[in-house]
Amino acid sequence: MKKVSLFVLMMMAPVVANAAGTYYSGYTSAYQSPQTSYSSRQTGYANRYNTTYSAPSYASRYNTAAATQNRAVAAPAQQTASTTSSTKKSGFWLDAGISHEVGQWRFDMAQSGSVLSYDNLAWNVFDVSAGYAFNVGNTALQVDAGLKYGMQWGESPMYDDDITSGGFLVTTWIEAGTETVIGDQIGHALSMGTSQGGNMLGFNIGFGMPEVFKVGNVTFTPSIGYRYFKYKLETENNYGLSVDTTACFQIEGSDEIQCDPAIIVNLSDGKQQIIWRDDIDLPMDVPGNAESINTGSTYYYHQPGVSHSYETTWAGPYIAMDMDYVINQNNAVNGRLELGFPGYTSVGDQPYRFDWAHPKSVEDEAGMFSAFHLGMAANWTTAITDSVALSLGVTYDYYTVSGANAKTYLNGSFYTDWYNEILNSTQWNGDEEAMLNPDTGDATAINIKALEESCPGWVCSTDGEIESFYKSLGVRVGINAKF
């Protein structure tokens, strides 16, 4: 994660339009997906309502009296069908379970090339859901709702990568007097930390039409609904390396690229100069009137406390199809396919960034129907008693969003105080016009002023900046009861 102190070293204002785009690891610079949010229902979906109002499934899974009656009593066929239909279309079910889920959350930034990823996330999740099937005239309907809560299990690695995709623009150096562009100073950073203690919360509500049609021995139940999922992840004990580079060269006879570290020379007349070589074999000459040097944002760092904290939400409507297949009187399998169209919001805080606002440092948003969710589940159920069944299943989730807008909330007081300190120094004595002169003024003050203008209210915004995904795989054991 880069430090804003590098502004002091600039000869030329950076391209501040990139400020929000580099917010996770640059000056204005790092960044959660629903872990099988539908698993609270998935593993019990088909068997929940099918056990309630599916005649074959009802009888075979729970060995109901109705099923025994159909075998033992020689009732007229039409009468039996009528009784079964009545049982099938009404009833209440309750489902609860525990699951273990493993997932990954990652997001990429378009302009800066920054990548932040939480890998091998492990969650222990408890869920409970309930539903009711009923008749409206000759039409069978159902309503169901679920709630889930999960806690992060163990430790997971997080990495914040501003190296792989080339880094981000820090500033452009220009030769004073001639206005000749010397070159770009590029920032790179890579850090790795440990994530633990996260949590998740989700709920859903759905409406469906049970067993609308049947193909062979498989019945199908379409439904629509709304799903909400939020999770929080934090990173601690973050180790990183920050490197600013200048001129880059390809090694002769090889495809290897090497870049010089940025070295800024403080001259005796108060000006600054960047050391820039045109050839890798040339020495790094230091001017005779040099008083000191500065390596800018090239350093190693360790952040033992919370370095990253993100709270991410995926929420929106879905359509789903549940499938149920009865194996025998006591066993059945079912599956679910769900397509969701949620919105996406992720709010982050990086407490070590003194140049950012807290507790909200960054915010990424995409409206409802901007993201996509694919959910799948498969379950096996077996009857324990006439009204209780055990379920064992697997779930898979994939959430993704592309082109989400990004905001960075800067610490306006920090920049204002810095600006005023320069303005009231003995060099400028309150002469703001002279201080902001592009040829002879103070580079840091010019940068701060440009940053304020490009980020109204000290909020830097970049549209279409974020791509993010979350994927997970879970195993669940549950108990399903009908009433």
Image (cartoon, grey):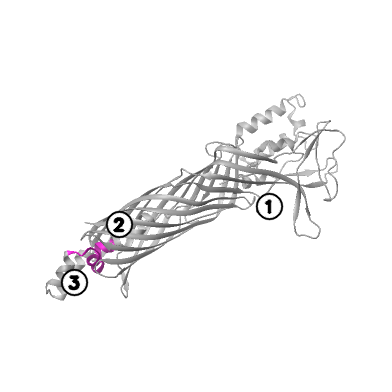
- Mark earlier in primary sequence (3, 1): 3
Q: Which residues are magenta?
A: 49-64
Which residue is located at x 37 percent, y 56 percent?
A: 476
Can residue 29 be seen here? The reply is no
Mark 1 or mark 2, whichever is nearer to me: 1
- Mark earlier in primary sequence (2, 3): 3
Mark 3 or mark 1, whichever is nearer to me: 1
Q: Main secondary structure of the magenta part?
A: helix
* Mark 1 vs mark 2, CA separation in Å: 51 Å
Mark 2 neighbour density, 10 Å: few (under 14) some (14–19) many (20 or more): some
Q: Which mark is residue 81?
A: 3
Q: Is residue 296 left or right of residue 406?
A: right
> Callout 3: helix, strand or loop?
helix
Q: Which mark is residue 425?
A: none
Hey, what amino acid is under mark 3? Ala
Q: For residue 332, what is the image quadrant?
A: bottom left
Q: Which mark is residue 166?
A: 1
Residue that badge 2 annotates: 143
* Mark 3 vs mark 1, CA separation in Å: 69 Å
Would you say residue 57 sits in the magenta stretch? Answer: yes
